[in-house]
Amino acid sequence: MASLLDEAQELIELSLQSDTDKKDYDHKARLWIEKAKATLPTHDHGSGSCASCGFDLACPSCGG
């Protein structure tokens, strides 16, 4: 399962391709946003770093 950061990188790369279908990109981007919003309130960071906990894009404990 890809992390939010991995998925964001894929979306950015997709957006840079000249042959990308805008509707497909918009759909994937909206799904990613909803996933990030749903994950944020339920994420329990603990004492590790964002990179080690896998929530490496918007960790509420680190303010990132």
Image: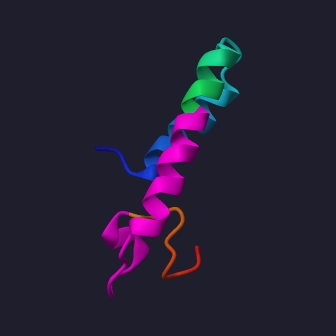
The magenta stretch is 29-54
User: Is residue 8 in view?
Assistant: no
Q: Position of residue 15 (x, y in %)?
A: 67, 29
Q: Quadrant of the C terminus?
A: bottom right
- Colour scheme employed for the rendering of this structure: rainbow
Instruction: In the rendered view, tell whether residue 18 sits above or below residue 57.
Output: above
Q: Quadrant of residue 11?
A: top right
Which residue corresponds to the image point at 55% horizontal and 29% vertical from the top-left?
28
Is 58 left or right of 56, judged from the image as shown?
right
Query: Magenta segment: does it hold 38?
Result: yes
Task: Indicate whether 22 appears above or below 3.
Answer: above
Q: Is residue 61 above or below residue 9?
A: below
Report x, y in % for residue 29: 60, 35
Q: Residue furthest left?
A: 1
x and y, in percent, of residue 39 in the image: 43, 58
Quadrant (top left, top right, bottom left, bottom right) of the N terminus: top left
In this image, 37 relative to 20: left or right?
left
In this image, 8 relative to 19: left or right? left
Observer-nearest residue: 34 or 19?
A: 34
Q: Which residue in the rendered view is the most extreme toward the bottom?
A: 47
Q: Residue at x 47, y 42 (%)?
A: 7
Is 18 located above or below residue 34 in the figure?
A: above
Q: Going 65% across and 13% down the picture, which residue do you hit?
A: 21
Quarter of the view holding residue 52: bottom left
Quarter holding residue 17: top right
Q: Residue at x 66, y 11 (%)?
A: 19
Residue 55: in sight, yes or no? yes
Determine whether, in the image, residue 11 is placed left or right of residue 7: right
Q: Main secondary structure of the magenta part?
A: helix
